[in-house]
């Protein structure tokens, strides 16, 4: 009985904080606030014999510090605690679903505040052999999945991660796809793909993969500086197309050692592709952090660019700002133009509520908090702001 009560309480709390996500005029909106995807493709280095040993608890502080607001998965996250942690950190999820088994997942998690949209397929259009050597079979599956999900959950869009720009066959076959993701590797110019798709459709789009690895095959050595330079150019090129494109999930969060050889070591194997600056995709060097979670130079590029281009949900709703941030003296100050009391909640990156109080003065005592990154929620009359809080 106790477990049942806890489950019902969890469902009740999630439903209270569920959000409506919709697409309009090529934009994504969360509870009527425009949302920009400043994202990363997220895999933890687990697969084909590799287990990095790291969990979401290790990764969320790095994601938050890099101002990443969205992760794109390659498999559905079934751990509720993990989804809760992402939600409390202010990170939304583009959730990849298995096209052969997905209705149970959508029914279970459709009200979870971490969900931004559902996604089917990652470059499946490159593999007609998976569908009887007829790619139309995949588009038929995709349309069926998208329409079924929308009937179950009308509050979240459906997307797909298409390899390169979808053609007329793909677009006409899948009217229920709300957002077209594109995996684009065109040296330093993914923005050209945005223009090409915009010329064919008025559907929303995002760049579901783009980027550069940190190994240069010409010099046979790692070159993090070149990866950082390419990342800066690629991200800025996509941001310049913000009128047409809702954002990007950069490929990728961490190096994965299972892709090109021995899963217990980092190998330089890969394949020829239009990747800066050697026209070669070194599959195990794509992370903005290493497999052991050490930030590369490109991590700081992502951090700076995403900070300058973020659109924070509800930040303008309550017109509240905080300072200083980071905090080192145990107190933060509120600039609250309404001068009305606020409910204040602070969560750690595991989703635990560590402070809950009502503001009476213009400062909050956070001296009980250990050094780290937290999520600060300010609530008033059903409205809320969520801000990143850094304790030093």
Image: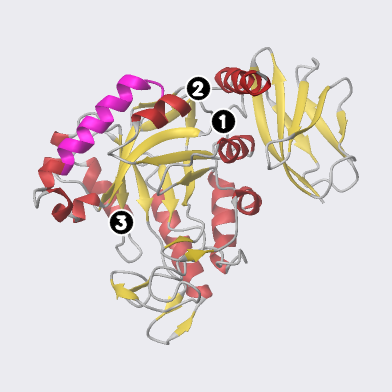
In-image side of 392 versus 281 (left or right): right
User: Can you say whether 28 is above or below 47 in the image?
Assistant: above
What separation in Å lies between label 1 and label 2 (alpha carbons)? 8 Å
Total residue callouts:
3
Query: Mark 2 — residue?
Result: 31
Query: Mark 1 — residue?
Result: 313
Residue 105, percent across and down?
A: 41, 31
The residue sitting at the bottom extreme is 219
What separation in Å lies between label 2 and label 3 (alpha carbons)? 30 Å
Q: Residue at horizontal 43%, vertical 58%?
A: 251
User: Can you say whether 69 is above or below 222 in the image?
Assistant: above
| Residue 156 in view here | no
Residue 273, percent across and down?
A: 28, 70
Q: Is residue 224 magenta?
A: no
Q: Which residues are magenta?
A: 138-155
- Say whether disc 2 or disc 3 marks the residue closer to the N-terminus: 2
Q: Is residue 149 magenta?
A: yes
User: Can you say whether 307 is above or below 244 in the image?
Assistant: below
Task: For label 3, count other residues whose C-alpha is less than 10 Å away and answer few (under 14), some (14-19) or many (20+).
Answer: many
Magenta segment main secondary structure: helix
Query: Mark 3 — residue?
Result: 184
Task: For label 1, count other residues whose C-alpha is less than 10 Å away and answer few (under 14), some (14-19) or many (20+).
Answer: many
What separation in Å lies between label 3 and label 1 (alpha carbons)? 28 Å
Tag 3–tag 1 contact (CB < 8 Å): no
Q: Secondary structure at mark 1?
A: loop
Residue 220, percent across and down?
A: 42, 86
Protein image colouring: secondary structure
Tag 2–tag 3 contact (CB < 8 Å): no
- Say whether disc 3 or disc 1 marks the residue closer to the N-terminus: 3
Tag 1–tag 2 contact (CB < 8 Å): yes
In-image side of 205 versus 294 (left or right): left
């Amino acid at each position: 009985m106790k477990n049942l009560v806890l489950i019902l309480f969890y469902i009740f709390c999630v439903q209270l904080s569920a959000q409506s996500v919709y697409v309009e005029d090529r934009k994504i909106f969360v509870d009527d606030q425009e949302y920009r995807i400043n994202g990363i493709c997220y895999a933890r280095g687990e697969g084909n014999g590799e287990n990095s040993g790291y969990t979401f608890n290790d990764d969320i502080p790095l994601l938050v510090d890099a101002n990443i607001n969205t992760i794109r998965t390659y498999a559905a996250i079934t751990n509720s605690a993990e989804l809760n942690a992402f939600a409390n950190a202010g990170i939304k999820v583009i959730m990849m679903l298995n096209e052969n088994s997905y209705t149970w997942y959508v029914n279970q998690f459709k009200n979870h505040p971490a969900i931004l949209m559902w996604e089917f397929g990652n470059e499946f259009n490159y593999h007609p052999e998976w569908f009887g050597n007829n790619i139309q079979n995949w588009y038929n599956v995709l349309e069926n999945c998208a329409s079924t999900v929308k009937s179950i959950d009308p509050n979240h869009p459906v997307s797909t991660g298409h390899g390169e720009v979808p053609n007329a066959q793909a677009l006409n076959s899948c009217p229920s796809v709300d957002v077209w993701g594109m995996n684009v590797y065109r040296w330093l110019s993914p923005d050209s793909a945005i223009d090409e798709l915009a010329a064919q459709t008025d559907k929303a789009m995002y760049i579901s993969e783009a980027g550069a690895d940190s190994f240069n095959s010409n010099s046979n050595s790692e070159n993090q500086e070149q990866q950082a330079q390419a990342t800066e150019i690629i991200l800025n090129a996509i941001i310049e197309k913000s009128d047409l494109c809702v954002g990007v999930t950069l490929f990728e969060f961490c190096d994965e050692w299972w892709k090109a050889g021995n899963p217990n070591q980092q190998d330089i194997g890969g394949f020829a592709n239009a990747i800066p600056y050697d026209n070669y995709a070194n599959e195990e060097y794509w992370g903005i952090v290493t497999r052991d979670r050490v930030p590369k130079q490109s991590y700081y590029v992502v951090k700076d660019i995403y900070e300058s281009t973020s659109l924070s949900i509800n930040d303008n709703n309550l017109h509240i700002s905080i300072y200083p941030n980071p905090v080192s003296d145990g107190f933060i100050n509120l600039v609250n133009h309404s001068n009305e009391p606020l409910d204040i909640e602070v969560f750690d990156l595991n989703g635990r509520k560590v402070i809950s109080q009502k503001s009476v003065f213009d400062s909050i005592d956070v001296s009980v908090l250990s050094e780290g990154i937290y999520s600060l929620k300010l609530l008033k009359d059903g409205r809320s702001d969520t801000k990143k809080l850094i304790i030093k």
